[in-house]
Amino acid sequence: AQKFGIQEALELLGIHDINDGTSTGSKHFSSGELIESYSPVDGALIAKVRTTSAKDYSQVMDTATAAFKAWRTKPAPQRGEIVRQFGQKLRELKEPLGKLVSYEMGKSYQEGLGEVQEMIDICDFAVGLSRQLHGLTMHSERPGHRMYEQYHPLGVVGIISAFNFPVAVWAWNTALAWVAGDVCVWKPSEKTPLCGIACQNIAAEVFKANNLPEGISCLINGDYKVGVFMTHDKRIPLVSATGSIRMGKIVAQAVASRLGKSLLELGGNNAIIVSPDADIKMTVIGAVFGAVGTAGQRCTSTRRLIIHESIYDRVKEAIVTAYKQLRIGNPLDEKNHVGPLIDTDAVKNYQNALSKVVEEGGKLIVEGGLLEGKGYESGCYVRPAIAEAKNSFEIVQHETFAPVLYLLKYSGEVENAIEIQNGVVQGLSSAIMTNNLREAERFLSAQGSDCGIANVNIGTSGAEIGGAFGGEKETGGGRESGSDAWKVYMRRQTNTINYTTQLPLAQGIKFDI
Ligand code: UN1
């Protein structure tokens, strides 16, 4: 049972005076215009948030730069201890934060809690990592010389995140960046600014309790114009951006033009291959959660099912039957499976995709449509839809951030399915449902899936912390949240030390003076 309502959750997260735009989120140099955060759940105005002006931004950067000077000298395991405390605070506030995520973004309460759990998991991962930021030791070719490499903090890391994971994606970046000795400046999506403020409040409390400057974590608010401050700022060696391919290309070019580094986690067009050897029951669960979870607004959402012709009708029927059971409505009500889309623009994109697929010759087998009437007043609730389509359709090639699932048919061997699966510009997540070892291994081989994530007998979404997360091609190539992703947040230095009284040159070069 849920212990409290949304107002109490906001209070617990330190978000007060919600009707007074000037006081919400304006604690730290906020003097820009106001943005309004409406809940897609009930259409209510939750709060107004003041954005970051150019002058505010420069103050934020001064604060961050000063904080970095202190933070980088703290031993990494001690930085890990701060991240441990932050993870502990998240455990205590898991329910209110999960609730705010659900209310401001619209995902189900269970998924809101899951998102906070991802934050906790990355904190645990980062704490362990804080004692393992290893470099290698090499043998020098010169006598009496020692050579090794070490990783140093990079500086101020800029984080641009999307509305769909309004808290977890920040934590993936920030937890690793903090143990690496970096400080972070975060621009959350202007569609979910309160989630950003809640996270900032939690971090600020931990820093304050440890007599550390709050500048280790900085928050800036606003739309893309505020993001531009960071992409053009030479003081930011790394910009980590999550969002659309369009946005990623703009960020990458701006950052590259000043030879900065960018870490990109962009769109996906994720498919599940359903082989004749698939377990149909598991396929249905994986595909339906993948397609309608978070109302199809995950970058890992299942967008395409590539089904072998021999079982096509059976799988289609099973999925259509499952769609009939879906309950769409208030995501805070735990009997509902699917909540609203983020806003009415997203509804338009969804409607556009449905008419596009029909125009191109596809067939809607689960019609979809906008829901109206009691409980749907926000205008953001839509029915998940399914269309039979072809991979070559323009709309199928495009990532529509909504619950629209395309059924594609393949014949012959698994190679044919893999070709369809790889036949898109995106390369984030992929899966095969099969009990056939040869097919599974083929899918995972060098001739197999070209995605950053390739699963067997699991859907495309719901990756866990610990593995590197990200994708190839226009997904942007970045890796976050596990494995050796920490390295991008640090600078590597190679050190050679001579402990003799001679100065021999490398490559045996003679230079006598
Ligand atoms: C995203 O949609 O940007 O793998 C991230 C998943 C989640 C993260 C998705 N753990 O679906």
Image (spheres, helix red, strand yellow):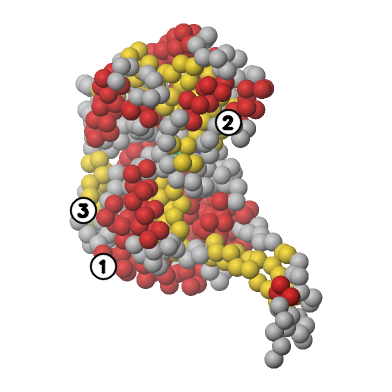
Between label 2 and label 1, give the one nearer the viewer: 2
Between label 3 and label 1, give the one nearer the viewer: 1
**What number is the disc on residue 55?**
1
Q: Residue at x 35, y 57 (%)?
A: 254
Q: Quadrant of residue 64?
A: bottom left
Say few, some or many: other residues with alpha carbon within 10 Å of mark 2 (under 14 / 14 to 19 / 20 or more): many
Q: Is mark 1 within 8 Å of ligand 1?
A: no
Q: Mark 2 or 1 closer to N-term? A: 1
- Seen from the viewer's position, the closer of residues 143 and 300 is 143
Q: Is residue 378 above or below residue 81?
A: above
Q: Which residue type carries mark 1?
A: Lys
Where in the figure is residue 180, as x and y percent of width and height?
A: 55, 61
Q: Which residue type carries mark 3?
A: Leu
Q: Secondary structure at mark 3?
A: strand
Q: With 296 as the anchor, is 75 left or right in this view?
A: right
How far apart, in angstroms, are the residues tagged by discs 2 and 3? 49 Å
* Residue that carries the numbered disc 3 in the rendered image: 34
Asked if residue 1 shows in the view, the reply is: no
Q: Residue at x 39, y 20 (%)?
A: 390
Q: Mark 2 or 3 closer to N-term? A: 3
- Seen from the viewer's position, the closer of residues 140 and 133 is 140
Q: Is residue 117 above or below residue 186?
A: above
Residue at the right extreme?
143
Between label 2 and label 3, give the one nearer the viewer: 2
Q: Is residue 374 above or below residue 190?
A: above
Q: Quadrant of residue 157?
A: bottom left
Q: Secondary structure at mark 1?
A: helix
Q: With 428 as the anchor, is 295 left or right in this view?
A: left
Residue at the bottom extreme?
513
Q: Is mark 2 within 8 Å of ligand 1?
A: no
